[in-house]
Image (cartoon, rainbow, N blue to C red):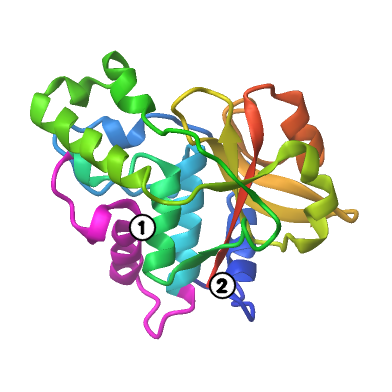
């Protein structure tokens, strides 16, 4: 909270995000506990917890009171449906729903359609169609809840910018925008998340990289990063308010 506060939450987010460069990548932290609880660490991240944690810190920095309890309350509001922890299914497991809820709570604005994104008719159901990958879904009650939330999520519009079009839209992307990378995998909404940061006139990705095992700025511009990885189909762009 001692880092400089910028004029916008998004710009403050990019300042905070850069302070974590070099911190290690660690997957599976939210699923380690037997009982669902709020997990908070500022030492290591996966791509989603990095975006979520930095966003909560930036929002806290722009709040009248910038202390740890306020940060935890925003983290919980971002991570859990209605900000209530009520078992595994209460956590937002699809980043698309994270974006929808953040917009409903006036935390972020989905800029994708405004930037010329195109609609997708993709059906999101990866978790329930790959039940064996998720130990918590072996409980029938939890499986039924997640199935219901997938159905609700599929009722929302889903816009994305195909990766072939990202370069020509770079001028509309601002430092601190959340970049969510859409997936070619059947049933899955997004593969990866990070923050946009401009270097030498091009948009790069500031993210917790599974490939490089740390928080870093991508060596190549975002467009080249997308083209290098076949499972990436494009991006959605969210802007913190």
Q: Which residues are magenta?
A: 61-87
Q: Give the labeled residue for mark 1.
A: 78
Considering the numbered disc 1 on the image, is that residue within a helix, a strand or a loop? helix
Is 131 on the left-hand or right-hand side of 173? left
Residue at point 32%, 71% (across, down): 70
Residue at point 46%, 70% (across, down): 59
In the image, 181 versus 66, the foreground residue is 181
Image coordinates for residue 217, horizontal then vertical, percent: 71, 44
Q: Residues within 10 Å of mark 2 (few under 14, many from 20)?
A: many
Image coordinates for residue 32, horizontal then vertical, percent: 26, 30
Is 12 on the left-hand or right-hand side of 97? right
In the image, 3 versus 137, the foreground residue is 137
Question: Residue 191 magenta-drawn?
Answer: no
**Can you tell which mark lies on residue 9?**
2
In the image, 13 versus 238, the foreground residue is 238
Considering the numbered disc 2 on the image, is that residue within a helix, a strand or a loop? helix
Residue at point 38%, 26% (across, down): 126
Sequence-wise, the earlier of marks 2 and 1 is: 2
**Can you tell which mark lies on residue 12?**
none
Distance from label 2 to label 1 (Cα)?
15 Å
Up the image or down, 195 lies above or below 224; here it is below
Up the image or down, 108 lies above or below 150; here it is below
Q: Does residue 227 appear anywhere in the picture?
A: yes
């Amino acid at each position: 909270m001692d880092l400089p506060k910028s004029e916008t939450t998004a710009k403050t987010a990019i300042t905070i995000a850069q302070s974590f460069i070099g911190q290690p990548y660690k997957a599976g932290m939210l699923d380690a506990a037997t009982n669902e609880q709020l997990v908070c660490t500022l030492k290591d991240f996966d791509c989603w917890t990095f975006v979520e944690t930095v966003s909560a810190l930036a929002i806290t920095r722009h709040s009248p009171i910038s202390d740890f309890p306020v940060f935890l309350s925003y983290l919980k509001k971002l991570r859990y449906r209605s900000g209530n922890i009520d078992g595994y299914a209460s956590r937002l497991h699809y980043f698309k729903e994270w974006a929808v809820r953040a917009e409903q709570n006036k935390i972020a604005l989905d800029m994708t359609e405004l930037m010329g994104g195109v609609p997708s008719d993709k059906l999101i159901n990866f978790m329930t169609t790959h039940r064996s990958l998720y130990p918590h879904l072996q409980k029938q009650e939890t499986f039924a809840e997640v199935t219901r939330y997938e159905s609700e999520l599929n009722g929302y519009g889903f816009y994305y910018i195909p990766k072939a079009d990202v370069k020509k839209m770079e001028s509309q992307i601002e430092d601190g925008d959340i970049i969510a990378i859409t997936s070619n995998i059947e049933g899955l909404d997004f593969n990866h998340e990070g923050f946009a940061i401009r270097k030498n006139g091009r948009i790069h990705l500031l993210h917790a990289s599974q490939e490089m095992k740390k928080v870093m700025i991508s060596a190549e511009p975002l467009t080249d990063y997308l083209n290098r990885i076949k499972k990436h189909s494009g991006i959605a762009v969210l802007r913190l308010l």
